Amino acid sequence: MKKEVLVKFGDRVREERLKLGLSQEKFAEKVGVHRTYIGMIERAEKNITLENIEKIAKAFNLTPKDLMD
């Protein structure tokens, strides 16, 4: 069973990525991670580190707090 916090975070990442009109691959390039990592986050398969939360938030021009709200 997937943890609710991971599902919510993954959904938020997908929502923000789609607002920018970016594929997972293009967004991964922008963040500086592998494309499969973004997919794993969006599917709640990965327990993401704080460092990567910060990278993703910066790619969206958000703070980590804004991304988590």
Image (tube, rainbow, N blue to C red):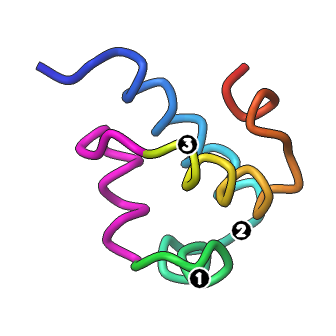
Q: Residues within 10 Å of mark 1 (few under 14, many from 20)?
A: some
Q: Which residues are magenta?
A: 35-48
Which residue in the protein does label 2 denote?
21
Which residue in the protein does label 3 denote?
50
Local secondary structure at mark 1: helix
Q: CA distance from mark 3 to mark 1?
A: 21 Å
* Residue depicted at x 58% and y 84%: 29
Give me the disc on residue 14: none
Local secondary structure at mark 2: loop
Give me the disc on residue 26: 1
Taking depth in this image into account, of 30 and 48 the one nearest to the observer is 48
Residue type beneath disc 3: Leu
Name the spot of residue 13 as percent of width and height, x first. 58, 45
Residue type beneath disc 2: Gly
* Residue depicted at x 43% and y 62%: 38
Image depth: mark 3 or mark 1 in front: 3
